[in-house]
Image: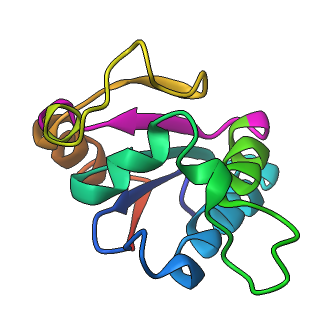
Amino acid sequence: MAEKIVIMLLNTRLDAPGTLGAPFFQATVAAAMDLEVEIYFAAETTQLLKQGVAQNIFPGEAREKSVYDFMQDAHEAGVKFYACAGAMGEHGLDDANAIPELDGKRGGGAFIGEVVEDGVVTLTY
């Protein structure tokens, strides 16, 4: 059985908000199952780590819960959030305007290093 789940957010898009709730919900569920969970934000998705962005995106028409609410649930459950440093620069994200839930910066090498380990399951969105 897996001990860890590593999630790569790469192909989800901010202009398709219906794609943004599931990764965080599933990460929360995995953490509740006592799995170690990390989410890597790459490309456009790094913008979700900027203050004020995810708070204003709602994955459902009812607008009951923002993407940021889902992110906070995941982080509170123990999910770690890592941003690609290159993508941060490309999308104007830095330590000063990042959400407090950002746990650090990790690049492609760190991601590959994680996903090749035994006991790790990788999900991409």
- Rendering coords of residue 79 (x, y %): 62, 40
Quarter of the picture holding the C terminus:
bottom left
Whether residue 88 is situated above or below residue 33 in the rendered picture: above
Instruction: Give the residue furthest to the top.
Output: 96
Whether residue 56 is situated above or below residue 22 in the rendered picture: above
- Rendering coords of residue 105 (x, y %): 30, 25
- Residue sitting at x 75%, y 46%: 34
- Residue sitting at x 33%, y 36%: 83
In the image shown, does 90 or 105 lie closer to the viewer?
Answer: 90
User: Does 2 sit left or right of 74 as displayed?
Assistant: left
- Rendering coords of residue 122 (x, y %): 38, 64
The boundaries of the magenta stretch are 76-86
- Count of marks placed on residues: 0
Is residue 84 a member of the stretch shown in magenta? yes
Quarter of the picture holding the N terminus:
bottom right
In the image shown, does 72 or 116 lie closer to the viewer?
Answer: 72
User: Does 17 sit left or right of 56 as displayed?
Assistant: left
User: Does 73 sit left or right of 87 as displayed?
Assistant: right
Whether residue 18 is situated above or below residue 123 in the rendered picture: below
Is residue 33 a member of the stretch shown in magenta? no
User: Does 38 sit left or right of 115 as displayed?
Assistant: right
- Residue sitting at x 79%, y 47%: 73
- Rendering coords of residue 49 (x, y %): 47, 39
- Residue sitting at x 24%, y 44%: 111
In the image shown, does 22 or 122 lie closer to the viewer?
Answer: 22
In the image shown, does 81 or 89 lie closer to the viewer?
Answer: 89
Colouring method of the image? rainbow
Whether residue 17 is situated above or below residue 47 in the rendered picture: below
